[in-house]
Amino acid sequence: MTLQKGHKLWYIPDGYIPTVSSGELESHESICILNCTYEDAHIEVTVYFEDRDPIEKIGVVIPARRTKHVRTGSLVKNGESIPKGVPYAMEVESDIPVIVQYSRLDATQAENSLMTTMAFPLNQ
């Protein structure tokens, strides 16, 4: 019996990058993707907004048997990126099964806060 490690489709419904940070650390969010397979994972991230069209299918490659932390503020397609101070959500789609975690560093006050959670997987 072979155990499938991960899923091909993940959702992250709550995203928000603050406009202001305090101290030395900058507020940011990351998609943490683990690829346990022996082949590269080709990821497409679609970013959804409350009041505008999505940024669709931003490509990211996760090498075989590696992990990658992708800052959501670095996701860019055709010169468009996630603006600070705007709520958003993400769909993370992979051509092979991967594991997706979501992390947020809130440095808007002197007492920094770090939050992390697993993204919501869907079976395909």
Image (cartoon, grey):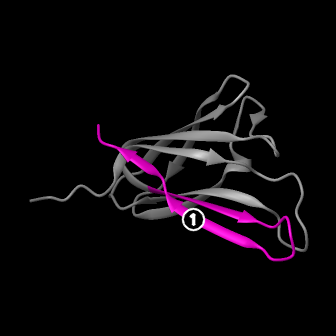
The x, y position of residue 66, in whole percent, is: 46, 64
Residue at coordinates 48% horizontally, 52% vertically from top-left? 119
Does dot 1 land on a helix, a strand or a loop? strand
For residue 34, above or below residue 76:
below
The x, y position of residue 115, in whole percent, is: 62, 66
Local packing at callout 1 (Cα closer than 10 Å; few below 14, some 14-19, many 20+) is some
For residue 80, above or below residue 75:
above
Residue at coordinates 82% horizontally, 64% vertically from top-left? 26
Q: Residue 46, located in which quarter of the rendered image?
A: top right
Residue at coordinates 90% horizontally, 57% vertically from top-left? 20
**So how many labels did they put on this image?**
1
Q: Quadrant of the C terminus?
A: top left
Residue type, label 1: Thr
Comparing 115 with 32, the one in front is 115
Q: Residue 23, located in which quarter of the rendered image?
A: bottom right
Comparing 91 with 64, the one in front is 91
Q: Which residue is mark 1?
A: 116
The x, y position of residue 95, in whole percent, is: 38, 40
* Residue 85 among magenta residues: no
Residue at coordinates 87% horizontally, 76% vertically from top-left? 110
For residue 105, above or below residue 120:
below
Which residue, as the protein is rendered here, is positioned at the far top?
A: 53
Image: magenta residue range: 100-124
